[in-house]
Amino acid sequence: MVDRRKFLATAALAAGSTQAAPQLAIKGGKPVRAKPLRADYWGPQYYDAKERQELMDVLETGRPFRWYGRGTEPPMKVATFEKEFAARFGTRFALAVTSGTGALQTAVNALQIGPGDEVILPAWTWHSCYDAVVLAGALPVFAEIDESFNIDPTDIEGKITPQTKLIMAVHLQGNPADMDRILPVARKHRLKVLEDCAQSVGASYKGRPLGSIGDIGIFSLQLNKTITAGEGGAVTTNDPVLFERAARFHDLGGLRDVHQRVLGKPQLDWFVGCNFRMNEFSGGVLLAQLRKLDLIVGAVRANAQRVYEGIRDLPGLHLRQLPDPAGELGAAVFLGFKTKEQCERFKTAMRAEGVPVSNPGGSANLPTLPYVIHKVTVHPAWPSFTSPRGRSIQYAGCCPRTTDILSRFAGPHLDPKFTRADTDDIVAAIRRVYPQIVG
Ligand SMILES: Cc1ncc(COP(=O)(O)O)c(C=O)c1O
């Protein structure tokens, strides 16, 4: 016998109708999934004989250090990774470093940002962005995000002062920041643009790889990112002076043969550096992962597309703003609500359906955090906050729109290895729950 409820649910789904919506699991209906859907870390799901071989090469040759080692052959894992990274991202230069945080510090120092300078960054981003500015002795100035969850281009100009040197365009949770609206503001005020691609490795903006559009790009290759060796990072640029300063800073101020060969004649001299050098084990794993980047990105994008397609006709559908839908990574599909309360009800009902959703994540609403509000640094005389401007700037309450937006969006995370049945379940759960919340 045909289960009438199931028949109506299927019919409603097929027709895109919300009329005969089945009972929500939260109200006693059968959940879409018995076992909750869970996205996994992407890169490690693709580990295979290629990564193993890269690691074995380093073990067998006994050459774990990128500059030199046993035997007569130069170690080549990190150097090859840099070469292929630059080629994949369409930049003249790429520098491998130990982390995205190290990449940010390297880039900020390459740009010669320091005491007395101001840097505009989104209120919603990862701690490392703020830290890199403060660690350089410069002053962070927050701008609001918009419904893309990236920096709101309309909020940048009002934050510019004669001390502003840099805009951080952070491409968050797979979504490119709107570079066509950010770059003209930067050009008009002669500011540099740093693209932080940590959360969007492999995404693009209007056909251009992220990390190749601004003056300098940074990447994280930590576990939560598209490809990974557990930790790792990279800096990209087309500017030889920025690359040289980055290469020197990431080492101890000198310039090694590998980078001299890439650069040609050096233009700078020694200065102090940080040692953010990548080792050959990480370089090998990341080389194997880089060669799978397009496979991973293609798979996760296809899954996101299936979800977007499946919910496109829902009445009143409000999605995260996507400045370039084709370039987005598809890390998550976020739906918007009029109020935080509606969003919370959506989260509770989706969890009951076995398709958990969450608010935007992977970043912090920085101006709401006590260490930011109170300008806490290791040394009380840190130059970021001792100037009259540094003393007077107030972070608490500076970006209320950011807090509001983050509370009103939620969605499922996607995984490149989700099956068609998994994405069908996401669609089915959203189709069942969303109309009942917004309707
Ligand atoms: C936007 C952003 N920038 C920088 C970083 C720092 O990267 P890492 O964790 O590799 O230091 C992260 C890490 O999550 C990030 O999300």
Image: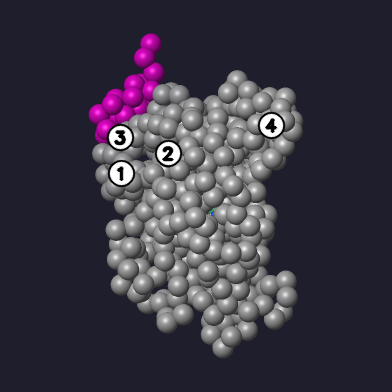
Q: Position of residue 385 (x, y in %)?
A: 61, 80
Which residue shows up at 49% across the image and 71% down it? 119
Label 1–label 4 contact, CB within 8 A: no
Which residue bears the numbered disc 1? Answer: 207
Above or below for 265 versus 33? below
Which residue bears the numbered disc 2? Answer: 88
Asked which quadrant contains residue 330, the reply is: top left
Of tags 3 and 1, the one toward the viewer is: 1
Which residue shows up at 57% across the image and 36% down it? 286
- Whole-angstrom CA distance, mark 3 to mark 4, is 56 Å
Residue 90: in sight, yes or no?
A: yes
Q: Which residues are magenta?
A: 1-17
**Which element type, helix, strand or loop, lies under badge 2?**
helix
Above or below for 179 versus 425? below
Q: Position of residue 239 (x, y in %)?
A: 43, 57
Task: Specify whether residue 387 is painted magenta.
Answer: no
- Whole-angstrom CA distance, mark 1 to mark 4, is 42 Å
Which residue bears the numbered disc 4? Answer: 72
Q: Position of residue 269 (x, y in %)?
A: 58, 64
**Which element type, helix, strand or loop, lies under badge 1?**
loop
Asked if residue 244 lies left or right of residue 332, the reply is right
Amino acid marked by disc 1 = Gly
Residue count near mark 4 (Cα–Cα under 10 Å), binned few <14, some 14–19, many ≥20:
few
Quadrant of the frame with the N terminus: top left
Earlier in the chain: of badge 3 and badge 1, it is: 1
Residue 40: in sight, yes or no?
A: no
